[in-house]
Image (cartoon, grey):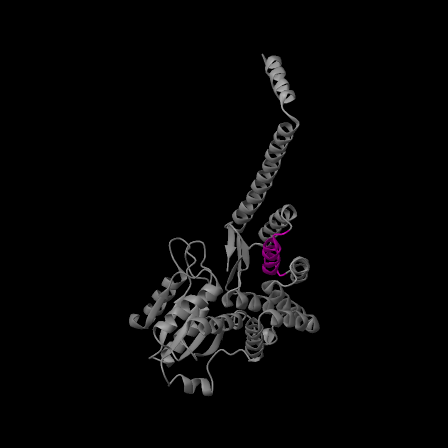
Amino acid sequence: MKQTLLALTLGGLLALSPLALQAAESSMQMERDLNTLVSKRQTVDMLLGEALQIYKSPAKISHAGFTAKMPSNMELVTERLLAAYQLEPYRTDLLISAANAQIYNGNLSRAITLLEQAQAVAPDDLDINSYLAIWQLVKGNKEASRSYLAKVADRNSGRAADLEEIIARVQRITATPLQTELTGDQLKATKEGKRAIVTLGYALNPDGSMDKILLGRLQTTLALAKADPEALLILTGGVPQNRQTEGKLMADWLANHGIDRSRLIEENYATSTVDNALYSAYALARHQIDYAVLVSSASHVRRGQTVLEIACDQIGPANLKVASVSYPDKPLEELATPSESELLGIYRDALRTYGMWSYRSAPLLER
């Protein structure tokens, strides 16, 4: 039976005119090409799906208030993204996402290499040149940073001005000495206008209890709240553990220590420092706050202040003044000069808050 069908098929092809035969061959080639494309698409989709699954893995490490993916997780994410890029070498978004995975790992040199690879393919890409301007600055390569910033300015003077403002803000905040209480003009400001204290959460223990670092931040907050009884308190943190969130537990703790519930604003949705800033800015704008004091750990507070100021620039309230007070999770003298690692974290979250997406390779999408 099979031989008969084969004979009939061959006979049919031989009976075709040369033009019809060419059309049949073209159709079969198109089908083969389509199958190849579908297979490649399926492979890329599979790799990106795996990257997303690894990224969302519950394995985490927490330090100084930053709950991040394990470095090994981010290496695996990078591997999947680069494998996808090998199949679709026009997808510079895959290189940008891979570079940002390396930023999370603290591997600045590799991130720059990946971004330079992307820039060679897309030399006019605004985000690629923006990232390179910032990361070369953090790396200490000021001339290279200025070169990339000039490329940004050629394409979009507004973006270049925004980056200059972010750089100036980071330099101002990191040059300001860390402090464990308000002093001088800051104390005077607590007597004027509408005021708020913004306390950043810290990852809860698996049983839903508060870590000693979070309790230290709350003790600092309590002292500030008692010194300024008219200030509202925004308690921000929404990573759940054992059906508890940081925002709720912080509010409960302060209420149990004598702070009136009417002053407390629970923010139970933030899952990162960037979220802390954005959700807090919504609350600050809602209450038309003029002056805010940010409370976090000494090793984290400069990042927190930077992103809160950027968030308020975008959301409001306009012209908000921000000061910061630290809970000394480490000796302040050890933190006097920010390390490359701290600067990397500050600028990474500053760019995210500003609106640049770290991961832009669907379905792996995150601001």
Front position in the image: 318 or 260: 318
Q: Is residue 96 above or below residue 337?
A: above
Front position in the image: 141 or 67: 141
Q: Position of residue 138 (x, y in %)?
A: 64, 69
Left or right: residue 50 compared with residue 218: right
Q: Residue at x 62, y 34 (%)?
A: 32
Q: Position of residue 90 (x, y in %)?
A: 63, 52
Q: Residue at x 63, y 17 (%)?
A: 11
Q: Is residue 312 above or below residue 96?
A: below
Q: Is residue 300 above or below residue 36?
A: below
Q: Is residue 137 above or below residue 61?
A: below
Q: Position of residue 283 (x, y in %)?
A: 37, 70
Q: Residue at x 66, y 73 (%)?
A: 146
**Main SS, magenta residues:** helix
Left or right: residue 253 compared with residue 25: left
Q: Is residue 101 magenta?
A: yes
Q: Residue at x 47, y 71 (%)?
A: 308
Tally the numbered discs.
0
Quarter of the image for residue 140 reads bottom right
For the question of whether residue 312 can be seen, the reply is: yes
Which quadrant does the N terminus fall into?
top right
Front position in the image: 23 or 321: 23
For the question of whether residue 201 can be seen, the reply is: no
Magenta region:
90-106
Q: Is residue 361 magenta?
A: no
Q: Position of residue 54 (x, y in %)?
A: 54, 48
Front position in the image: 218 or 237: 237
Quarter of the image for residue 41 reads top right
